[in-house]
Image (tube, helix red, strand yellow):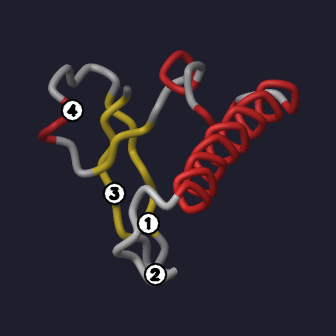
Amino acid sequence: MICATGVNQSDGTVLLVLNPSVTDVSTCQYVVQSGSDVAGSLLTMSAQTGGLYAAAMVSVWLIAWSFKALYKTLGVNSNESD
C-alpha cells in the first residue's frame, strides 16, 4: 500500500501526491492499494469463480430452507404460529 496526501487545487479538485517511502499507512491521509494488494480481492474474481460462490450460497440457503420445512412438517416447534 502506498501513502498519499491530498492537495486542494484552485478549481476545487484534490490532487493525490503519492509517497511510497512511508511504511506506517495508519498515519496517511489516503491509502492507495497497489496491484499486489488487490490481487486477492473479491472484486477481481472471474465469472467462473463468481458462479461457484453463488452456487455455494444458494446451496446453503436451500439446505437451511429444507430443514425449516422439515421441522415445520414434523411439528418439532409447535409453539410457532407460522
Instruction: Name the outermost residue toward the right.
Output: 48
- Kindly identify which residue carries mark 1: 14
Name the kind of residue labelled 3 in the image. Gly
- Kindly identify which residue carries mark 2: 12
Q: Is residue 23 above or below residue 3?
A: above
User: What is the secondary structure assignment of the residue under circle 2?
Assistant: loop
Residue at the image position 45 percent from the left and 83 percent from the top: 81
- Tell me which label, 2 or 4, sits earlier in the chain: 2
**Picture disc at residue 25:** 4
Q: CA distance from mark 1 to mark 2?
A: 7 Å
Residue at the image position 43 percent from the left and 56 percent from the top: 76
Name the kind of residue labelled 4 in the image. Val
User: Dot 2: few (<14), some (14–19), or many (≥20) neighbours within 10 Å?
Assistant: few
Q: CA distance from mark 1 to mark 3?
A: 6 Å
Residue at the image position 71 percent from the left and 37 percent from the top: 59
The image shows residue 50 at horizontal and vertical percentages of 77, 34
Q: CA distance from mark 2 to mark 4?
A: 26 Å
The image shows residue 58 at horizontal and vertical percentages of 72, 44
User: Dot 4: few (<14), some (14–19), or many (≥20) neighbours within 10 Å?
Assistant: some
Q: Is residue 33 above or below residue 35?
A: below
User: What is the secondary structure assignment of the residue under circle 3?
Assistant: strand
- Kindly identify which residue carries mark 3: 6
| Viewer-proximal residue among 17 and 79 | 79
Name the kind of residue labelled 2 in the image. Gly
Are discs 1 and 3 less than 8 Å apart at CB?
Answer: yes
Are discs 1 and 2 less than 8 Å apart at CB?
Answer: no
Q: CA distance from mark 2 to mark 3?
A: 12 Å
